[in-house]
Amino acid sequence: MGKRDCFSGYHPLVNFSYFALVLIFSMCFMHPACLLISLLCALCYNIYLNGRKAVRFCLLFMLPLMLLTMIINPAFNHEGVTILTYLPSGNPLTLESMAYGVAAAAMLVAVILWFSSFSKVISTDKFVYLFGRIIPALSLVLSMMLRFLPRFRAQIGLVSESQRCIGRDISDGGILQRARNGITILSIMITWALENAIETADSMKSRGYGLPGRSAFSIYRFDRRDTRAMVFLLACTAYIIAGWVLGATAWRYFPSMKGMAVGLYPLTVFAVYLALCILPFVLNLKEDRKWIRLQSAA
């Protein structure tokens, strides 16, 4: 992580509940204010977690993806009553289709950023702790898969570097030679993966996996801090759902854009939604300031 994440130190149930809520709300709420809040909060938290990598990722991948989504939707969706101009094909270009394209792009990027932060905060240990008793086989397979992917990436980098040192990399020689080198690297990686699977199976068997009455060690404890955080999440969720039922987060794009009139109640719903989404970032800033004060006092 780019910095020490205070929110990751909370109980796994708090972490998982938070990401489940923000992901569900991000995918369900199409109101421009909700989309903007979700996108900005996801961006801030992702940058806090990953630092420069998050900025580079957003500029190289998320921004082009967002622009592509914004362009594709008006090209194929011609609904809406506000016609701006006509495309060369004769189909109308409407304001509503462009607005929906922007909204869809914002939702897509926000969800991807939230999932990126999720993968940083929810480790395999937390995932197994949460779902090991409910779905033990599936949780084990998912945790092993999530752990295997970064290890496979790191190992293939080592193998490629070793092959490059002896002139057998996929960038050396002609087309046929490159193909042979690539097959060699793939064969090495398959052998490594199979050996790793056998070692993992032997290790699990020696530790008594699958035996009846086997206990599981856990370092997680639900303390007062986690209780306060869970109460806050539940209170925000209840208020947001109430706002959704009463139409405060509703927004229509077709045939014309329309939502609830701006008033005190919709603004309070958006404020609570902002408080929910920005929670980890605020906790981290508070912890950073506390750490700076302690260092200054020392």
Image: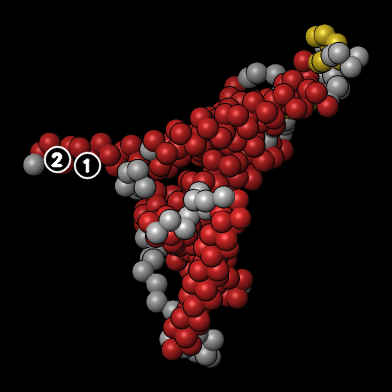
Residue 83 vertical placement versus 226 (above, below): above
| Residue lying furthest left | 298
Give x and y (percent) for residue 139: 57, 69
Give x and y (percent) for residue 96: 78, 19
Give x and y (percent) for residue 158: 41, 59
Q: Disc 2 marks which residue?
A: 295
Q: Disc 1 marks which residue?
A: 291
Residue 249, located in which quarter of the rendered image?
top right
Residue 79 vertical placement versus 131 (above, below): above
* Amino acid tagged 1: Trp
Q: Which of 226 and 152 is in front in this view?
A: 152
| Residue lying furthest right | 90
Q: Which of 217 and 73 is in front in this view?
A: 73
- 6 lies left or right of 58: left
Q: Nearer the viewer, residue 134 or 168?
A: 168
Residue at position x 23%, y 40% from top? 290
Check whether the beta carbons of the residues at disc 2 and disc 1 lie within 8 A of each other: yes
Report helix, strand or loop for mark 1: helix
**Any part of residue 217 in sight:** yes
- 289 lies left or right of 256: left
Residue at position x 64%, y 26% from top? 67
Mark 2, residues whose alpha carbon is within 10 Å: few (<14), some, or many (≥20)? few
* Amino acid tagged 2: Gln
